[in-house]
Image (cartoon, grey):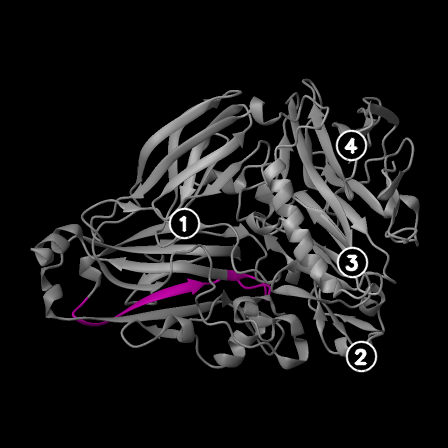
Amino acid sequence: MDNGILQLTLSNPSGFVTGIRYNGIENVLAYTGGENDRGYWDLVWNFPGKKTKKTKGTLDRIEATKMEVVMQSDEQIEISFSRLWNASSTMSVPVNIDKRFVMLRNSSGFYTYAIFERLKGWPAVELDNIRLAFKLNKDKFHYMAISDDRQRYMPLPEDRTPPRGKPLAYPEAVQLLDPFEPEFKGEVDDKYAYSMDSKDIKVHGWISTNDSVGFWQITPSNEFRSAGPLKQFLGSHVGPTNLAIFHSTHYVGAELIMQFQKGEAWKKVFGPVFIYLNSFPREVDPLLLWHQAKNQTKIEEEKWPYNFTTSDDFPASNQRGFVSGRLLVKDRYLRSEDIPANGSYVGLAAPGDVGSWQREYKGYQFWTKADENGYFTINNVRSGRYNLYGFVPGFIGDYHKATVFDISPGSNTSLGDLVYEPPRDGFTLWEIGVPDRTAAEFYIPDPNPNFANKLYLNQSAYKYRQYGLWERYAELYPDEDMVYNVDVDDYSKNWFFMQVTRKQADGGYNGTTWQIKFHFDDKTKNFTGNFKLRIALATSNVAELQVRVNDFSVDPPLFTTGQIGKDNTIARHGIHGIYWLYSVNIPAASLRRGNNTIYLTQPLATSPFQGLMYDYIRLECPDSVSHITRS
């Protein structure tokens, strides 16, 4: 495929991208390895029950068996590479897959999307990972950019291989002992240090500074990615590698394995994404290519949904619907009138329960951000049945409108004013943190200087991206666990951002118990009924949270979550995973005038990566007392 700006070479009939010729570079892709290892769609799958502990599933590079030119004109060309499920094979994934590549006239790039389809009666199957990957020419592309403040020159893949690199606590993290470029010596490289929230993955890629050429992946919409706007995905990392991940279990765990029952039909379109190449004259700073790529991203967003794709499975704008409304927050303990849900995220996803969008993967999701007055418009919604979901920064919990909305082509649904009433039983006695679904506001230590990523050394917003911060807890609290006094302590300085295990001298691990201390004065003598302890968790990994009040020896505890979560956020340098919200009744009789202590115990301890991150904790007094106090 050649439009005079670039030439795209694809293998026939397998549909692998084997070459991209652009601006005098014969091939911007890797020239080593096989032709199926340069640009490709792939997936990881399993038949239910077939997976062993030592494997993540079967990797399938999706080698197509049929090539067809589905559209060719002076303005565009679209080619299909398809593969039908072979029912006689016991080793093929029961999904029909059609990979599409589109090139337009006068376009400095190409588009690609894929149609996945299961028919009724097919065997059960599990899909772990669906992605599009490009491996670039490592002799040319050394500078990576994934956002305005996350870009840098990157080490070579050979730097990660022993003896030049030393694997650390898990294979993705490697300390660079003898890299080809001395500037990287001693750094830790880990692809998870460059993961991003889905809502922020719009453009990322690489620059060849010597050639003044950029290679970018532009994603104008995230409607086809799994699990909503806060789901984290990999993007670009050492290779040089450029990924579009449409579905993965990262930062969620096994709950997000796509599970299809025997006989279950399904169809979903992943993409299109735009692979954009740009260049500057040699005298222009090549790093400015990033800004041009951002401008192109805005152009692509304005063109979404694309009207040039030939598949009926990708509907144009006039075949989609629109939903609008206003979200307000009702919290009479804060304000007598409803509060506009400024900055809230509002979205349509498959019908489900409160917060179910975090674990939803078979359908499409459409999210937008409300303005300062709470007004929102969700554009270009595919036909289908949806619930409305939302969450509001500054307030705990999830909004959910259980009404099922049937969106049809051209429909325009106005919902008017919607009111979210977050969980609340009484006035706030004290609170720790900010309800924003992350642990970013808490104390994040400096990394061990021997295991740093230089990109994040002077960026407080990304301190949590450093390797080994779980080990810093025991260094800061060598003998006793954290004690936090709500009357004098500052959560940004005194609340460690993750409750992790403590390594022992014999190599084993112990659980940890944190204490929250607070004081009640004589006014509390009128308190009856239950106080309410709200605990919002930003993530959990094979952990349990036990709550006790004023007596650490009580067994069973007043409350326990049981074992929850397999987010692996701690090991993967995250600051949030799946959101959990718990409300714990604390009998007034268990509290006393004077000093009180709440004990938060995480007892499970077989790994350094087990633990919790808190989003927000609040103690509310009983409602009757609140009103007495207020009057």
Q: Give the alpha-carbon distance from disc 2 to disc 4, as whole Å.
A: 42 Å
Local secondary structure at mark 4 = strand
Which label belongs to residue 182? 2
Residue at 86% from the left image edge and 57% from the top image edge: 137
Amino acid, disc 4:
Lys
Rendered image: mark on residue 343: 1
> Which is in the foreground here, disc 4 or disc 1?
1
| Quarter of the image where one finds residue 164 | bottom right
Residue type, mark 2 in image? Pro
Disc 2 crowd, CA 10 A, few/some/many (<14, 14-19, 20+): few
Mark 1, secondary structure of its residue: loop
- Which is closer to the viewer, label 3 or label 2? 3
Residue bearing mark 3:
280
Q: CA distance from mark 3 to mark 2?
A: 28 Å
Magenta residues, start to end: 592-611
For image coordinates 66% across by 28% down, the residue present is 307
Residue bearing mark 4: 99
Q: Is residue 463 left or right of residue 177?
A: left
Q: Position of residue 29 (x, y in %)?
A: 86, 51
Q: Name the quadrant containing residue 41.
A: top right
Residue 332, compared with residue 151, is above or below; it is above
